[in-house]
Amino acid sequence: MSSVSQALTTQAKGSTAPGGIVVQGLRKVYGQGDTAVEALKHVDMVVGPGEVVGLVGPSGSGKSTLLKCLGAIIEPTAGRMVLGGKTIYNGQWATKDLRSLRRDNIGFVFQAPYLIPFLDVTDNVALLPMLAGLTNAAARARALELLAELDVAHRAQAQPSELSGGEQQRVSIARALANRPTVILADEPTAPLDGERALAVMRILNRMALQSQAAIIVVTHDEKIIPTFKRIYHIREGRTVEEAGEGRSLE
Ligand SMILES: Nc1ncnc2c1ncn2[C@@H]1O[C@H](COP(=O)(O)OP(=O)(O)O)[C@@H](O)[C@H]1O
Ligand SMILES: [Mg+2]
């Protein structure tokens, strides 16, 4: 039995705590007719709660498409996606309210931190919890707690433009974690950072995965961080192959 069908069977029996990511037979075709591009042909993937996996593949192989499908940013063409024990897509979306689905379940970390330039560091992190219904004070408290965990509490009142690249990336990770997502999707999060900063980001993501039992997918080309993954999915021409990684220690 494949690990995907095993995971689905286990979830169906309800014998494990719900969590993680299950992708089964995911397909995505952009456009129609002569100009159609089949970006994902058949993708299977399982990421357990608390696990960090790498997603590696050449340019154009479908990495961003897969993350966008999982993040409910674009709609797949076929297949199934389960996040945190809930089927979110099975030939069609399980809900019409994709905005809430994203806000409450998914944290995004991008290569460029995309911080909001006219909000200070605390408000950048507090914004999503506020939109999710926390009071101003509770959202700011949550933001300060995360900034402390990520060693950037001393920059809480700074403007994003005053931060170094590494500090901006840590603030963007704090923002991704602010709503306690069950799933974190990171697209080349260490690309602009030097070796030590890149490993620091991976250390943080691994710690956060353990603490909050989030399932984390990191798209990367970065040779500095690839040896840190215990498991890697290679994607080629829209299909995934799973492989054991070195799992080099970060602590
Ligand atoms: N919006 C789009 N419309 C049409 N084709 C697209 C679109 N986005 C991506 N593609 C195509 O889908 C394939 C996979 O792209 P992408 O997921 O961006 O790959 P990667 O992130 O691995 O570089 C490529 O052939 C790309 O040209
Ligand atoms: Mg891409």
Image (cartoon, rainbow, N blue to C red):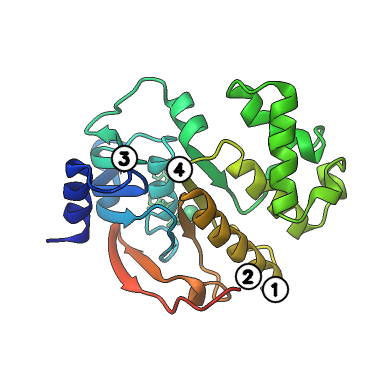
Residue underneath mark 3: 85
> What amino acid is found at the position of numbered circle 2 in the picture?
Leu
Secondary structure at numbered mark 4: loop
Image label count:
4
The residue to which callout 1 is attached is 196
- The residue under the point 37% across, 41% down is 84
> Does residue 232 lie above or below 171 as drawn?
below
The answer to whether the residues at label 1 and label 2 have Cβ atoms under 8 Å apart is: yes
Q: Marks 3 and 4: CB-CB under 8 Å?
A: no
Q: Amino acid at mark 1?
A: Glu
Mark 3 neighbour density, 10 Å: few (under 14) some (14–19) many (20 or more)? some
Q: Residue under circle 4? A: 182
Q: What amino acid is labelled 4 in the image?
A: Thr
* For marks 3 and 1 on the same chain, the one whose residue lies earlier in the sequence: 3
Q: Secondary structure at mark 3?
A: loop
Camera-side residue of 136 and 23: 136
Q: Residue at x 81, y 44 (%)?
A: 160
Task: Name the N-terminal-most of marks 3 and 2.
Answer: 3
Cβ of mark 4 under 8 A from ligand 1 = no
CB contact under 8 Å: marks 3 and 1: no
The residues bearing labels 4 and 2 have C-alpha atoms spaced at a distance of 23 Å
Q: Is residue 111 above or below residue 114?
A: below
